[in-house]
Image: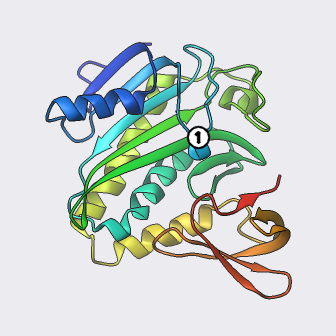
Amino acid sequence: MCYPEPFTFPLITLDETDSTSNHLARLCQENEVAEYTTVIAAFQSAGKGQRGNHWESAPGENLLFSFVLRPTFLEARRQFLLSQITALAVKEELDTYADGIRIKWPNDIYWQDRKICGMLLENDLEGNKIGCCIAGIGVNINQEAFHSDAPNPVSLMQITGQRHSIPDILTNILARVHAYYEQLRAEPDGEYPAKIAARYAAALYRNTGFHPYRDADGTFRARLADVEPDGRFVLEDEAGRIRKYLFKEVQYLL
């Protein structure tokens, strides 16, 4: 894969690594790594996902990358904003290729009922501020078939019937992250966080109607009522009961 020279942001390209997030975290421990430094790999031997899941990806066929931010202007309690802008950046880039792209709470990207992208944001705190955020993202781009036991993967190629430029998609996602993040840096306490939340809410998967879920008490049907600023997922079940969940406390049933 060819990337423009010079690339817009500091870019490290690897043929293979355990995970791009692990590689970037090691660099951050050893050196002062510039904000927006991005690590991309053709293959990950141990890609990480939510709930400890492994990310299946054929070598060279998909977009596997991580980037670092240093949002010291944000209090730790507001870290979900970083998840929201990253999910929106990926979702809005994929919107340019296909209809039906949605954000599945908290930050998976779905096409219809199938997963095209997963991401994991890991934040290090400095007091009550966020010192460092490493966002690891896997987007299925050109893979023609999936063979793991993952229930519902899909690639952009499967959706559109065409191969796509991985460097172009990476460039555009990072540009979108940059635009969101720099405006958030300029207006962390103004109206902008509310605008992010509204845009995120409008982009959510299954944001209308009643759908099946499972929590520690069993299965139920509910509608999406809200996503709170800390990322808490708020559902209203068919009996009118409000149920609030943190990450990993509730599952969508597909």
Residue 113 percent across, percent down from the top left: 78, 48
Any part of residue 247 in sight: yes
Dot 1 surroundings within 10 Å: few (below 14), some, or many (20 or more)?
few
- Amino acid type of the residue that numbered disc 1 sits on in the rendered structure: Gly
From the viewer's perspective, is residue 217 above or below residue 132?
A: below
Q: Position of residue 90 (x, y in %)?
A: 51, 45
Q: Nearer the viewer, residue 81 or 5?
A: 81
Question: Residue at 67% across / 21% down in the picture?
Answer: 143
| Residue 27 quadrant | top left
| Residue positioned most to the bottom | 240
Q: Is residue 181 left or right of residue 247?
A: left
Q: Which residue is mark 1?
A: 52
Q: How many marks?
A: 1
* Residue 241 placement (x, y as % from top left): 76, 86
Q: Quadrant of the N terminus?
A: top left
Q: Is residue 48 left or right of residue 29?
A: right
- SS under mark 1: helix
79 lies above or below 92: below
Q: Nearer the viewer, residue 130 or 227?
A: 130
**How was the colour assigned to the protein in this rendering?**
rainbow
Identify the residue at horizontal 40%, vertical 33% (top origin): 21
Q: Is residue 3 visible?
A: no
Given the current orientation, which residue lies at the most extreme front position? 217
Task: Kindly indicate the quadrant of the structure image that contains residue 232.
Answer: bottom right
Query: Seen in the image, is 62 located left or right of residue 237?
Result: left
Q: Is residue 178 left or right of residue 223?
A: left
Q: Position of residue 91 (x, y in %)?
A: 56, 48
Point 32% across, 31% down: residue: 24
